[in-house]
Image (cartoon, rainbow, N blue to C red):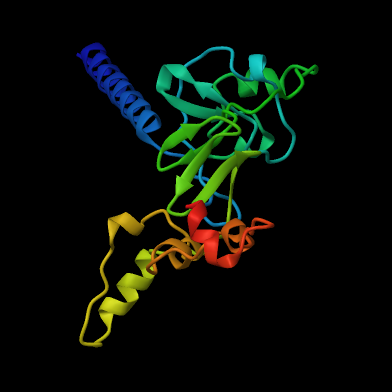
């Protein structure tokens, strides 16, 4: 009977351990990085428990380096190979400990996983791409957008500000004016266009030897 009792205790403990391991796996797969979400530390993507060559292929980094990141395709996530990932709830790549900590020779840190170009409204644009933002043009340069600073004829924020007040009238967004600068509005939308400089510089032509009274004869 004592043998049966010991077998029952062993079976119960084994079941509890197996249940705890399964629960921990689910937590690890669903958890996100515990990096401080402050402005100074930023946010990191979730880690995973898969095995593979990540840091071994990408390289290791000393200290904290948020660009020391590689794609974790099996988990559709990112993982890190910098020393900062060594925390209780780690966001290190699966092979970080075995490669970056135990092997003496590291591969040099390679280029970041993040692609070249710029992001706008969730879309990726190649380096040198140009897009139009109302009346201004924006060029992707060095992973940043550099935009012209023209004053636009239609300003949605100004329309919204005016319509919040009690002025007895409301401002409207006229689509035919969208994309025009304020200067273009003055030049092309205030009535008859002025004569061009070439036209203004023209002088009356006279024909020598013909009296003024006979100028009409030439027509």
Foreground of the two, 24 or 111: 111
Is 187 drawn above or below residue 107 in the view shown? below
Which is more toward the observer, 163 or 83? 163
Is residue 49 in view from this perspective?
Answer: yes
Q: Is residue 43 above or below residue 184?
A: above
Residue occupying image coordinates x 54% and y 28%: 79
Q: Is residue 89 above or below residue 102?
A: below
Q: Name the spot of residue 41 as percent of width and height, x first.
A: 59, 51
| Residue 143, picture quadrant | top right
Is 81 placed left or right of 75 in the picture?
Answer: right
Please say whether residue 37 is visible from this viewpoint. no
User: Residue 101 placed where, x, y %?
Assistant: 71, 24
Residue 98 percent coordinates (x, y): 64, 18
The residue located at (31%, 71%) in the rendering is 160
**Residue occupying the point 46% across, 18% down:** 73
Q: The N terminus lies in which quarter of the figure?
A: top left
Q: Position of residue 142 (x, y in %)?
A: 66, 39
- The residue furthest bottom is 167
Specify whether 171 is left or right of 60.
left
Rendered residue at 49%/55% (across/down): 217
Q: Nearer the viewer, residue 188 or 62?
A: 188
> How many numbered tags mark residues here?
0
Q: Is residue 135 above or below residue 139?
A: below
């Amino acid at each position: 009977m004592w043998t049966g009792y010991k077998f029952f205790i062993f079976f119960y403990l084994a079941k509890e351990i197996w249940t705890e391991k399964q629960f921990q796996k689910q937590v690890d797969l669903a958890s996100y990085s515990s990096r401080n979400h402050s402005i100074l530390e930023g946010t990191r993507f979730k880690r995973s428990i898969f095995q593979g060559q990540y840091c071994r292929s990408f390289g290791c980094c000393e200290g904290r380096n948020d660009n020391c990141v590689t794609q974790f395709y099996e988990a559709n996530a990112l993982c890190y190979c910098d020393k900062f990932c060594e925390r209780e709830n780690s966001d290190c790549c699966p092979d970080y400990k075995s490669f970056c900590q135990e092997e003496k020779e590291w591969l040099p840190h390679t280029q970041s996983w993040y692609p070249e170009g710029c992001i706008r409204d969730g879309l990726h644009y190649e380096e040198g791409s140009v897009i139009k933002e109302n009346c201004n043009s924006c060029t992707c340069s060095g992973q940043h957008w550099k935009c012209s600073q023209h004053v636009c004829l239609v300003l949605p924020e100004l329309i919204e500000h005016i319509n919040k007040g009690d002025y007895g009238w409301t401002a409207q967004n006229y689509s035919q004016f969208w994309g025009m600068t304020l200067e273009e509005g003055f030049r092309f939308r205030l009535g008859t266009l002025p004569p061009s400089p070439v036209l203004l510089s023209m002088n009356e032509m006279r024909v020598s030897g013909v009296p003024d009274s006979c100028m009409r004869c030439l027509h």
